[in-house]
Amino acid sequence: MAARAIRTTHVGSLVRPPDLVGFLHQQDHGLPFDQQAFDTCLRNAVADVVAQQCDVGIDIVSDGEFGKTMSWSRYILGRLGGFEERAAAVATGVTKAIAGKDRRDFAEFYDEYEGSFGFAGMGTQARHLGTWVVTGPITYTGQHAIQRDIANLKAALKGKRAEGFLPVVAPASVAPNRQDEFYKSPEEALFAIAAAMNAEYRAVVDAGFVVQIDDAFLTSTYDMMVPPATLREYRKWAAVRIDALNHALKGIPEERSRYHLCWGSWNGPHSNDVALADIVDLMLKVRTGGYSIEMANPRHEHEWRVWESVKLPAGKTLVPGLISHATNIVEHP
């Protein structure tokens, strides 16, 4: 019997070229920029990064997430109606990576690291982030932006043998620290976000690409909740977010979708990450065809043993991350 090839892909985000970073900086800070020049720069940057992925043999390639003008998750706030960003009452300095137990346990490390480098992302100076407030019904307004991203990836793949995918954000990772002046409960707002996100997911698969759902806040929230909350309380919170994601995936073919779960790759010890064994059953409830998990990271690379006792459902594909960047993680014993 012929051997089956193992197809290669990656998580999606790649290093932005300097000229593109300049445009992203202008947009993130609300500065004027040349729209036509930006569109040309973005299109050329996507073509270059797709060609590089194909040259090294990646089978399922992305646009590098170059079309996201802010971050892997905050980009969506430019594509949703019903949100308003309000300036913070007091500027508090560099935005913290995550204000949880990991940061409390290693406060000296984080103070030094954040003071030296910050968490600006994409090589730009971080701005003071305001508060995102829900002021009306949440709707999807990003049709132009997602179609631009689709067109750029299609053009870059023309004549290439690789398949394309586009990463998009999961409902749980959309403005998780938002304030709400419209919906009656956080859950009602969450499911409104999920319904709106369905439009972006559908656009990607309708274009013939694989849609990847990115969800770092589902796991990183454990570090903020536990302690004082318990694992049981966290799982109850997470289960609602999984239900919302499945609501967002309504009508999306499982074979054209995959779920990317990570622990947030910020540069820190990660000593309070939730164990994969404690959430794998929740992850497998997500109605996608594939599960992309961060498993090269020293804090989680030992967790391949989970699959000795957990059976991957029939028809599903495991997409384990086998190559990662180096950070200041405290290795698991």
Image (cartoon, grey):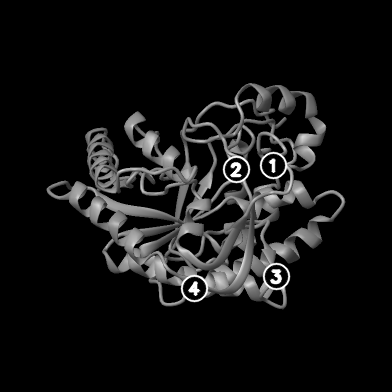
Count residues near mark 1 (Cα–Cα under 10 Å), then give few for <14, some for 14-19, many for 20+: some
Q: Residue 230: tell me if it is visible.
A: yes
Task: Tell us which disc is closer to us: 2 or 3.
Answer: 3
Task: Tell us which disc is closer to us: 4 or 2.
Answer: 4
Up-down relation of residue 40 to residue 213 (above or below):
above
Q: Furthest residue to the front? A: 32
Q: Along the polypeptide, which appears first: circle 4 or circle 3?
A: 4
Q: Which residue is mark 4?
A: 139
* 5 or 201, nearer to the observer: 201
Task: Tell us which disc is closer to us: 1 or 4.
Answer: 4
Residue 33 x %, y %: 35, 43
Contact, CB < 8 Å: mark 1 with mark 3? no
Q: Along the polypeptide, which appears first: circle 1 or circle 4?
A: 1
* 308 or 285, nearer to the observer: 285
Contact, CB < 8 Å: mark 1 with mark 2? yes
Q: What is the distance, in whole Å, between disc 1 and disc 4 at their CAs?
A: 28 Å
Q: Along the polypeptide, which appears first: circle 4 or circle 2?
A: 4
Q: Residue 243: tell me if it is visible.
A: no
Count residues near mark 3 (Cα–Cα under 10 Å), then give few for <14, some for 14-19, many for 20+: few
Q: What is the distance, in whole Å, between disc 2 and disc 3 at their CAs?
A: 23 Å
Q: What is the distance, in whole Å, between disc 1 and disc 3 at their CAs?
A: 21 Å
In the drawing, what numbered circle is on residue 98? 1
Secondary element type, mark 4 = strand
- Which amino acid type is shown beneath numbered disc 2? Gly
Res 118 → quadrant: top right
In the drawing, what numbered circle is on residue 264? 2
Q: Which residue is mark 3?
A: 186
- Which amino acid type is shown beneath numbered disc 1? Ile
x 66%, y 34%: residue: 94
- Counting the numbered discs, the total is 4
